[in-house]
């Protein structure tokens, strides 16, 4: 980004992951090999490994709101409240219209529709038993809209449907809204309720892409020679974004600065990734940011644990970082938490942000034998790595229908 533009910084982080309900817990799990994956029973599917969140749903909602709302809404409400609380911003009549909510999602409404059809089947498909809450529960803007109702925010809200690139896409949208002066504060990131729908399990299973292992904590194993698919997870990570001048004026703590981003499309196969387009997305982020591949200290790969997907992504990284004398460290988060779909990019970014302060890079998990086609220099595989300093983090997220996203964060320096 050119230096005459406003600078956008992160001043709050709220998250729930299968292995932690705030940044401190999540980071501890990543540094200490704590998995958040367990077996769960899914209607029509049976037992499958999944990443299940266990946050306090009553912290920001009452029981009636839980009954009439959605799981996606609850994840969003929890993360948004935690992000605003962490930032130290108080929502008042003076600022509520200048706060926007931008939530990336993989899908929404499937859970509600599946549950309603199932419930209807128990009453011989008598339509009068269909819930009158279905429409507001299943509209695409629900997760963001539930946040605005819960928190009394009257600025703009919408959801960004970007498959598994949605977490980064939500952050990019928040960044852009701040740059356009549409809002003064953006609550942005991604969430997922995916484990609540049998359809996603059934679809991955029919593709032969649903991970299997007798030990659920070892089922998600990106880069490993024995990887056999995706572990589906839920979760969320929403950030408070502000313009630097506003953050400094109120003495806010600053986690990092967004200095680059890019999104593009494969325009090819709806499921199989395209390494050429991924490499182009990476290069576009570098061109826009003014940051070079040589500047990057950590690359967090999207790597889902599918045989071909991991290879394609590693090929893209090799191409873009080929001329770097000092190769970046490479890690991945899905071995710990599975694939949190719309939340993946935002959660995985959060797991690396503390590296700006402590210089520690969390490892991958479950990589017993690296697939030679996935091998990259400086892969952090078993134990955390301590380095002298971390200045730039690059986060990659890709999704179905060929949507690619890259986000570059910089350690804040005034």
Image (spheres, grey):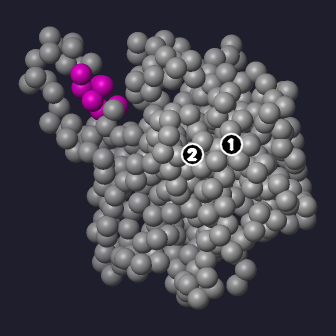
Q: Quadrant of the N terminus?
A: bottom right
Q: Contact, CB < 8 Å: mark 1 with mark 2?
A: yes
Q: On the image, numbered disc 1 is attached to which residue?
A: 313
Q: Residue at x 33, y 32 (%)?
A: 110
Pinpoint residue 219: horizontal percent, then vertical percent: 68, 23
Q: Which residues are magenta?
A: 111-117
Is residue 331 covered in magenta?
Answer: no
Quadrant position of residue 80: bottom left
Measure the C-alpha gap from mark 1 to mark 2.
Answer: 9 Å
Is residue 39 visible in this depiction of the protein?
Answer: yes
Pinpoint residue 403: horizontal percent, then vertical percent: 50, 47
Pinpoint residue 280: horizontal percent, then vertical percent: 63, 56
Q: Is residue 165 left or right of residue 125?
A: right
Q: Which element is circle 2 on?
A: strand
First in sequence, mark 1 or 2: give its number. 1
Q: On the image, numbered disc 2 is attached to which residue?
A: 398
Figure check: 409 above or below 328: below
Q: For mark 2, does the 10 Å Cα neighbourhood hold few (<14), some (14 to 19), or many (20 or more) residues?
A: many
Figure check: 288 above or below 278: below
Q: For mark 1, does the 10 Å Cα neighbourhood hold few (<14), some (14 to 19), or many (20 or more) residues?
A: many
* Picture disc at residue 20: none
């Amino acid at each position: 980004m050119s230096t005459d533009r406003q600078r956008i910084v992160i001043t709050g982080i709220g998250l729930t992951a299968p292995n932690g309900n705030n940044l401190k817990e999540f980071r501890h799990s990543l540094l200490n090999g704590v998995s958040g994956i367990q077996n769960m029973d899914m209607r029509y599917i049976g037992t499958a490994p999944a990443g299940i969140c266990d946050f306090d749903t009553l912290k920001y909602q009452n029981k009636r709101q839980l009954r009439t709302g959605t799981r996606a809404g609850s994840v969003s409400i929890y993360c948004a409240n935690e992000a605003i609380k962490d930032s130290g911003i108080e929502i008042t009549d003076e600022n509520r219209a200048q706060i926007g909510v931008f939530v990336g999602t993989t899908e929404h409404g499937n859970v509600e529709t599946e549950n309603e059809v199932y419930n209807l089947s128990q009453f011989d498909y008598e339509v009068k038993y269909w819930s009158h809450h279905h429409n507001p529960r299943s509209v695409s803007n629900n997760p963001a809209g539930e946040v605005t109702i819960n928190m009394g925010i009257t600025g703009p809200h919408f959801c960004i449907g970007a498959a598994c690139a949605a977490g980064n896409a939500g952050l990019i949208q928040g960044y852009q809204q701040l740059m356009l002066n549409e809002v003064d504060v953006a609550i942005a990131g991604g969430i997922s309720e995916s484990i609540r729908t049998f359809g996603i399990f059934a679809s991955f299973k029919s593709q032969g892409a649903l991970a299997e292992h007798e030990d659920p904590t070892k089922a998600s194993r990106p880069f490993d020679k024995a990887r056999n698919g995706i572990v589906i997870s839920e979760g969320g990570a929403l950030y408070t974004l502000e313009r630097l001048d506003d953050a400094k004026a109120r003495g806010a703590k600053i986690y990092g600065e967004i200095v680059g981003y890019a999104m593009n499309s494969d325009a090819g196969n709806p499921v199989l990734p395209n390494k050429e387009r991924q490499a182009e997305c990476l290069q576009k982020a570098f061109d826009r940011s003014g940051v070079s591949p040589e500047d990057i200290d950590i690359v967090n790969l999207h790597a889902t644990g599918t045989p071909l997907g991991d290879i394609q992504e590693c090929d893209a990284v090799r191409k873009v970082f080929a001329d770097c004398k000092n190769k970046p460290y490479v890690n991945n988060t899905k071995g710990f938490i599975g694939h949190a779909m719309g939340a993946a990019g935002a959660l995985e970014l959060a797991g690396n942000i503390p590296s700006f302060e402590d210089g520690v890079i969390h490892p991958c998990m479950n990589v017993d034998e690296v697939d030679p086609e996935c091998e990259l220099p400086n892969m952090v595989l078993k134990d955390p790595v301590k380095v002298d300093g971390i200045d730039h983090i690059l986060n990659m997220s890709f999704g179905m229908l060929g949507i690619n996203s890259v986000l570059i964060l910089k350690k804040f320096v005034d």
